[in-house]
Image (cartoon, rainbow, N blue to C red):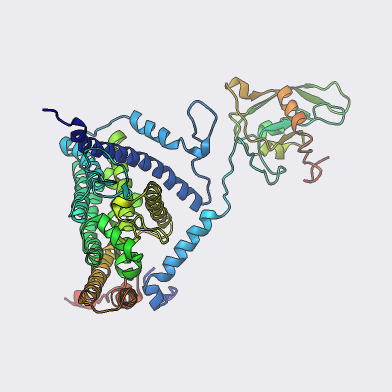
Amino acid sequence: MSIDWQSLMAPLIVPLVKIALLVFGLMTAAAYLVLLERWMAAWVQDRLGPNRVGIPLTRIKLFGLGQPLADGLKFIFKEEYTPAHVDKALYILAPLSIMAAALAIFAVVPFGSVLPLDLPGMGGQPIQLVVAPNVDVGMIYVFALSSIAVYGVILGGWASNNKYSFLGGLRSSAQLIAYEIPLGLGILGVVLAAGSLRLDAIIMAQAETGLWFAFTQPLGFSVFLIAAFAEAARLPFDLPECEQELIGGYHTEYAGMKLLLFLIAEFLHMVVAAFLIVILFLGGWHFWGMSVPADDLITWPQAILRILVLMAKVLAVILFFMLVRWSWPRFRFDQLMNLAWKVMLPLGIVNLLAVAAVVEYQHDGNGGGVALPILVGWGVALVGWILAASLAPLHTDNRPRMEVMQPPEFEPEGVLSR
Amino acid sequence: MKANDPSVTWIEEPKLGLAGKMYLPLFVQGLTTTTKHLFGPKVTVSYPEVRPKIDNPLIYRGVHRLNKDEKGRVKCVACFLCATACPAHCIDIVGIESPWPDREKYPQSFTIDELRCIYCGMCEEACPVDAIELTSLFDLTGRSREEMIFDKEKLLSVYDQTKDAEPMKSASLGGTL
């Protein structure tokens, strides 16, 4: 009996190649995003930014593109110091868990569409550019793992046995729990409209109509965008690690490779957020003017174009993340909570209701075409935003006021006469 | 001071309009400011390749020099005023009888410890004959402490180096020349 090894191995090798590509790509991307972040920071502040490190042992500078290598080497050669007062097991587990969770999310995130490669053993199917294709609960998987990320933060804060770290961990847990809800509500609108939890199906739904969900659900988009910023703990929501108040937050006590794991995981959270924003609301690999053939009819140029479009969009969203960092001041903690519970949560529900109503109306065969969802979406967004702004403003005035600051009247007569 | 002190003026904050409550002006303001600066001119000077421009060499306090007169002799008359004025005690002068008829003394040796100097410019102000001056050379480096102790010859050579770019300050600044 002869076994067709080739066709048995292909289903094993293809995912392994994808994982290797993805991990390598993500690590490189994280390193270069650090450089990009420093460049953006410098440019916004009228500086030049890192532009000296080039090819090692030469004088070639390459605009500072060697900087990530130097940074990485620095982290590797730093002393792996573990303070005496920490909970050793949890202290080591925290960066591992946050990194593992951040990487595992990418298992269902498509980094392209499909490749028309006809490999033996794959049944003539094109190769899907996802590590785990055909996961029907892709969205739920992403959600579950992004919730696990908070464990790394809390564990790090707890194990460090340091008040600042602990406060950072606590803030992080409160913030992430609060913003998971608007994040989920934002996603639900998209899932209802697309009719699937699969990320590739959600992209397909937008590609077929050419209407990205950002245009039909502007309210859901803004709720999701703001919640994604908070979930990734980026400014203006970086309270878990705000330097001015908490030194470094939950990673104050970390150094060397463990700190590097935390920092990479933070960047991966931002990358995941950017991918989700692009996939759910900005059409994924779709761009107007691109033909949308079925997956098994796709040609090489189309497949590569899709990858490029997706990556360009993700990069644009990441640049927006970095620009926002320098544009607005950090929220105060009470404002953060107000925004989550009094503004984002109601707005998310309103958006969900509006989407559900439109989907149900059109599902019954009534007309309205593409104009109806857009009109309803923008109308609801405008009315909802104005209502939320006038009913539950973020503005909480706790500055000194004359009537509050008046000293209480002191009447010494009673004391003296007794 | 108490809160109800009559000299305290209490100001009411202007009320937020609808746009302000909707967070829109702040949103637009922040993004336009950062975007403008993102593409705006940069202020960084890439130092070793690009030399920073010194606005006014006349008032810049860099490396010292000992000026020479028209005959090429050192202008210093070894009066010790600079050494006395120096708060860091970095000037060491040995004065001997001058071979020239126009002055009584001149410095046999004149050393400044450039590492000890705090570049305050007091020596320059104290000098009655405008012999010692601070130039606009700012990137002074050396490989040893000994190298950074400048003797008379070195200080005179600094003058030769900088005299074209920076003529003696005295005339324009109301000095004795």
Front residue (pair B24, A81): B24
Please tell me which residue is depicted at 40% across the width and 75% down the height of the picture.
Answer: B19
- Quarter of the image where one finds residue B66: top right
Percent x, y for residue A286? Answer: 36, 58
Query: Can residue A406 be seen in this snapshot?
Result: no
Q: Is residue A356 left or right of residue B124?
A: left
Above/below status of A367 relative to A341: below
Query: Can residue A37 be seen in this snapshot?
Result: yes
- Quarter of the image where one finds residue A177: bottom left
Percent x, y for residue A19? Answer: 26, 39
| Quadrant of the rendering where the C terminus of chain A is positioned | bottom left
Q: Is residue A263 left or right of residue A316?
A: left
Front residue (pair A249, A407): A249
| Quadrant of the rendering where the N terminus of chain A is positioned | top left
Above/below status of B26 relative to A291: below
- Quarter of the image where one finds residue B163: top right
Please tell me which residue is depicted at 32% across the width and 70% down the height of the picture.
Answer: A216
Above/below status of A201 relative to A416: above
